[in-house]
Amino acid sequence: MKITSRDNQRIKLARKVRDGFVKDAIFVEGLRLAEEVLRSDLNVSDVLFSGSFAQTERHRAFLQRAENYNGAEVSEKIFDSISDTKTSQGVVLIADKPETGRNIVESNLQKKKQTPLLVLLHQINNPTNLGAVLRTAEAANVSGIITTRNSANLFSPKALRGAMGASLRLSIWENADFSEALAWAKEKKIISTCADVNAEKSYTQVDWKAARLMIFGSEAHGLSAEEREQIDENLIIPMDNKVESLNLAVACGIILFEAKKQKDD
C-alpha cells in the first residue's frame, strides 16, 4: 500500500501524535529508535516509511520485521509533511506510550537489589536536554527518573531522539508534585541531594553508596531557596576560570558517573 494523500487518516493521526494531541501514543522517527521500539514490549499501531527508505540491508531487514505492523509506504512529499526533523529520516512509528507513575518506580526499586539512585528533574523545559539526561542516567545505571509538573514532555519526538531509547527502558514517574516526591523519598529513607553554588562539599565527597535522590532544577532558574530548604544535602561541582554553571546534561553526567564509580568500587 502506498499513501499519496495528506488527508489519509493514518497521516492525520501521525501528525496529531507528533504534535502531542494524543496523550497515550508516541511518535518515533528514525531507524535506530524505531528498531528500539520493535525490540521493546510496546504495542506498535502504525509504521510509515518513505519510498527511498530501503537503501541498505539493515533498512530492508527492518521493513521485513515491520510487515507484522501493517506498514505503509508514503510518498516523499507527504512523508516530509509528517517528519519532525529538518532532514527526513524515512521512517516513523506510532506506538503506545510506556507506562509511567510512582508505582512504576516503586516496582523497579523492589526488583533491584542495589541501593537506589534516582534522579528528579524539576521543571526542565528543554526536551533535548531532558533526553540527554535520560540517556546519561541509563548509562550510569540510575534506578528511576522523576519529573515534576511543568516539565517538558519526556515522550515528545525531540526528547525521544535525545534519549536514544533510554525513555523506553527506564522507570519513570511523570508530573510529580515536588514536595510530594521529596516526602516520598524521606519515607523510603532516600537522601534528597542537590547541587548548590554555596555548598561546601564537593560531589566527590558525597557518599554515593547511600540511597539518594539527585535533584536538578530548571536550566533558567535552578531551585528556589524554599525548594532547597526541603532537600537533605547539597553539593558543588568545583569549577575554574570563573565559570558559574554547566549545561544540565553535563552536570548530570559528572555527578552520576561519580556515583557509579563509588558504587562499582
Image: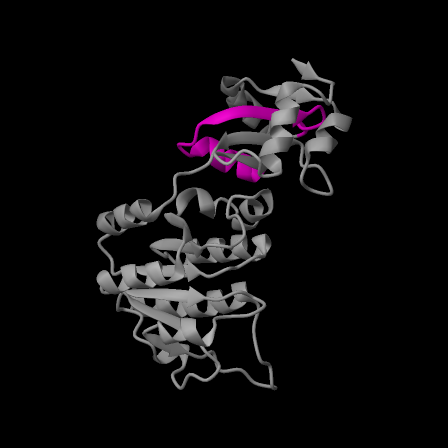
Image-based side of 161 in relation to 55, left or right = left
Q: Quick check: can you spot residue 30?
A: no
Colour mode? one colour
Image-based side of 265 in relation to 152, left or right = left
Residue 216 percent coordinates (x, y): 46, 66
Q: Is residue 217 above or below residue 125?
A: below
Q: Quick check: can you spot residue 83?
A: yes
Report the front residue among 35 and 43: 43
Residue 26 percent coordinates (x, y): 53, 36
Q: Is residue 80 above or below residue 106?
A: above
Q: Is residue 128 above or below residue 239?
A: above
Quarter that holds the C terminus: bottom left
Magenta highlight on residue 52? yes
Question: Which residue corresponds to the image point at 45% horizontal and 78% vertical from the top-left?
Answer: 196
Report the front residue among 20 and 45: 20
Residue stretch rendered in magenta on the structure = 30-55
Question: Which residue corresponds to the image point at 44% horizontal and 56% vertical from the top-left?
Answer: 148
Tally of numbered tags:
0
Quarter that holds the N terminus: top right
Report the front residue among 101 and 81: 101
Residue 118 percent coordinates (x, y): 35, 59
Question: Which residue corresponds to the image point at 56% horizontal and 72% vertical from the top-left?
Answer: 246
